[in-house]
Image: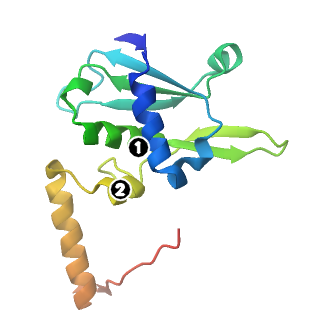
Amino acid sequence: MRYTKDDGTLAKVFNKVMKKFKDDFEHLKDTKILYLWFEGARARPGEQRVLGVTRLADKRMRDIFGYDIIIEINADAWPELSKRQRQKLAYHELCHIGVKQTKDGGVKHYIIKHDFELKRFRKEMEAFGLDESEEDFRMFLNLVRKKQKGGKKHGGSKHRKVRRDD
């Protein structure tokens, strides 16, 4: 695996996404992010190719260079992505970053796990929808909606809509 520092290409895309979806990423306004390219496979054989990774900067990176978060993007895959796919990837990686206040008034960053097993965030799906490759999940959602509207029973319990206030 080989890493190189971003030449400004990634920062431009990520900053555009943060500006476009300001309400979703307002909490990141003071977060210092290091963008890196990685070359070489990150997935095991038979697994989906890894397009990006978001992780906390270790103490050394924070203390010496001032970064809170490191976002690594697959340099081999980037040229194959459309503008929309690049923005969606940036949005996805930014969704992993959580910020909370500490007792002493400081901030602590943490990594947020995926909302869905298909490795997408609810906010990301609302903003970009599903890809063609996720057609099985789309069919599943349509089936769930159909059952919810009809109030059909499954496994002895009645399905109903669950409202999330967020």
Structural crowding at the residue carrying mark 2, measured as other residues with C-alpha within 10 Å and reported as few (<14), some (14–19) or many (≥20): few
Residue marked by disc 2 = 127
Earlier along the polypeptide chain: callout 1 or callout 2?
1
What residue is pinned by disc 1?
91
> Relative to residue 11, is residue 148 drawn left or right?
left
Front-most of 68 and 161?
A: 68
Residues at badges 1 and 2 in contact (C-beta under 8 Å)? yes
- For the N terminus, the image quarter is top left
The image quadrant that residue 77 belongs to is: top left
Observer-nearest residue: 1 or 159? 1
In x, y percent, where is residue 28? 59, 41
What x and y, as percent, mark residue 74?
31, 23
Residue 152 seen in the current view: no
What residue lies at 48% left-to-right and 73% top-to-bottom? 164
Q: Residue at x 62, y 40 (%)?
A: 29
64 versus 22 height, above or below: above
The number of numbered badges drawn on the structure is 2
Residue at 37 percent of width and 81 percent of height = 161
Residue 42: name its quadrant. top left
Question: Is disc 1 surrounded by few (<14), some (14 to 19) or many (20+) residues within 10 Å?
Answer: many
The secondary structure type at the circle numbered 1 is: helix
Q: Amino acid at mark 2?
A: Ala
Secondary structure of the residue carrying numbered label 2:
helix
Q: Is residue 52 visible?
A: yes
Left or right of 27? Residue 102 is right
